[in-house]
Image: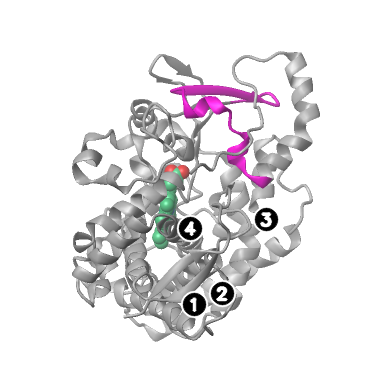
Amino acid sequence: MSTSVSKLRVRVGRSSADDLLRDARDLPTVLLTMLRSMVDAWPDEVYAERIVETKLLGQRTHFVVDPALIRTLLVDEAASLEREAFMARALAPALGRGLLTSDGPLWRSQRRTTAPVFRPDHIRTFVPGMVAAAEATRERWLRRPKEAPAVDLAQEMMRTAFDIIITTMTSGEAGLDAPRFAAAMEDYLGQTNWKMAYVMLGLPAWLPHPGARRGAAAARALRAAVTGLIAARRTRSGAEQDLLGLLLAARHPETDRAMPDDQLVDNLLTFVAAGHETTALALTWTFRLLADHPAVEHRVLAEIAAAGSDVARAPDLAERLPYARQVLMEAMRLFPPAPLMVRRTTRAIRLGDTPIPAGRSVHVPIYALHRHRRLWDRPDAFDPDRFDPARHAARDRHAYLPFGAGPRVCIGMGMAMTECLIVLTTLLPAFRLRPAAPTMPPAQFRITLRPQGGMPMHLARRVG
Ligand code: HEM
């Protein structure tokens, strides 16, 4: 199976004034390509080389696709990096300067304060809410008439993951209009690819673009909704063990300070934005890959059946479902929900033999790393056995990075894996999902990696 797409050639290596002129002429094509899918704008070399330098409109970028060099970059040189401006500028109107969009001391202080919120014992307290949301999807599917048309699984998983993050955040208390909140989040995130593409191409983010006005209104609505939620919880002095309660109670380990209200709003919105679409996409691609590989699906179903009827609620869920975990990991190798990490150097560094000056844009293209020809045998083939414990342990840890690496590794990783296993064990034994279109939809990279045109699937109840 291949998801290869026609690549737009971005110049590799040195460039001249002629190149610059040609780049300027290419600008509309480049912009369109980036808006359609940024993966298409990567040079082919990122699937075969260790480090690739590109130049576009005078901006140089290093793509790093070698595990040892990635380790140097993200772990050893973490203090020499900051987030790229395009990320912060595109997301800040809604997410402020929370964990995802801040750098330096502000980021460090927020990371230290919020890290305990995602401890495994806390994640276990989120499980009943996650199970309830997954069961709500199952009930909704059970109510569908037998001959109902195909569903867009991407939308279904988005809804499920959104229910999960909202339940996890608020224990389902009244006060948040979930459908309006979801629509505002969609309106906001839906237009950020324009802003990112503008800033990446050296253009101002305020240039007009489709959805800009709606996006600005959505950002205001999202912030107002979460501000209201915090105020309501404070008046009740409730001590719920949900994300909101845990975040309100969180203290910096050294200063013992709670987060100011604007940081609480920034981070709650960050968790919703960073946590729901990524998880939904991991599940969407997984269900489709399972449908295309019946032998693997059969093995997952047998494992779930052997794990017992209430496995979704079990505290040792992940240990009981090692093969299902492998399947999720392999799905996230082929279709990493967050396919690119971007940084800018704040001082000169070296990656192996390559000197990288201060102020350089450095990208880790996770999608390309996961399909790199030097690192993976049959890189485009779906094979969950790649992740059997012995084979996985023998592999360089930085060859596989669905959740990133270094101090900025995904804070919600444990929560996401638990959620994915719960949704899988709740839905797969109840429904046979079959693709409505024979070929896998192309992967479209717009911040996250979505199936272009959605993922239409037929749902049929399993009997017995
Ligand atoms: C399958 C699901 C998920 C995937 C694939 C994923 C992937 C990632 C990746 C690759 C990064 C690193 C980005 C970078 O270094 O540039 C990241 C960071 C982050 N993720 Fe996730 N994520 C997932 C789920 C979640 C969940 C459930 C939450 C929270 C509820 C979350 C919250 C965050 C936050 C706040 C950051 C920024 C951390 C920091 O900069 O300190 N993610 N995620």
> Marks 4 and 1, Cα distance to the nearest angstrom?
27 Å
> Marks 2 and 1, Cα distance to the nearest angstrom?
6 Å
Q: Dots 4 and 2: beta carbons under 8 Å?
A: no
**Label 3 sits on what residue type?**
Gln
Query: Where does label 4 land, which residue?
Result: 281
Image quarter hosting the C terminus: bottom left
Q: Secondary structure at mark 3?
A: loop
Q: Which residues are magenta?
A: 36-60
> Marks 2 and 3, Cα distance to the nearest angstrom?
20 Å
| Magenta-span inclusion, residue 171 | no
Q: Quadrant of residue 297?
A: bottom left
**Label 2 sits on what residue type?**
Ala
Q: Dots 2 and 1: beta carbons under 8 Å?
A: yes
The crowding category of the residue bearing disc 4, from other C-alpha atoms within 10 Å (few below 14, some 14 to 19, many at least 20), is: many
| Magenta-span inclusion, residue 52 | yes
Q: Position of residue 241 (x, y in %)?
A: 30, 75
Q: At 26% from the left edge and 60% from the top edge, which residue is drawn? A: 119
> Marks 3 and 4, Cα distance to the nearest angstrom?
18 Å
- Note whether residue 433 is visible: yes
Earlier in the chain: of badge 2 and badge 3, it is: 3
The crowding category of the residue bearing disc 3, from other C-alpha atoms within 10 Å (few below 14, some 14 to 19, many at least 20), is: many
Q: Is mark 1 within 8 Å of ligand 1?
A: no
Query: Where does label 1 land, which residue?
Result: 229
Query: Where does label 3 land, which residue?
Result: 191
Q: Position of residue 416 (x, y in %)?
A: 36, 60
Task: Name the front one of labels 4 and 2.
Answer: 4
The crowding category of the residue bearing disc 2, from other C-alpha atoms within 10 Å (few below 14, some 14 to 19, many at least 20), is: some
Query: Where does label 2 land, which residue?
Result: 225
Earlier in the chain: of badge 4 and badge 1, it is: 1
Task: Name the front one of labels 3 and 4.
Answer: 4
Asked whether 265 or 161 is in front, the reply is 161
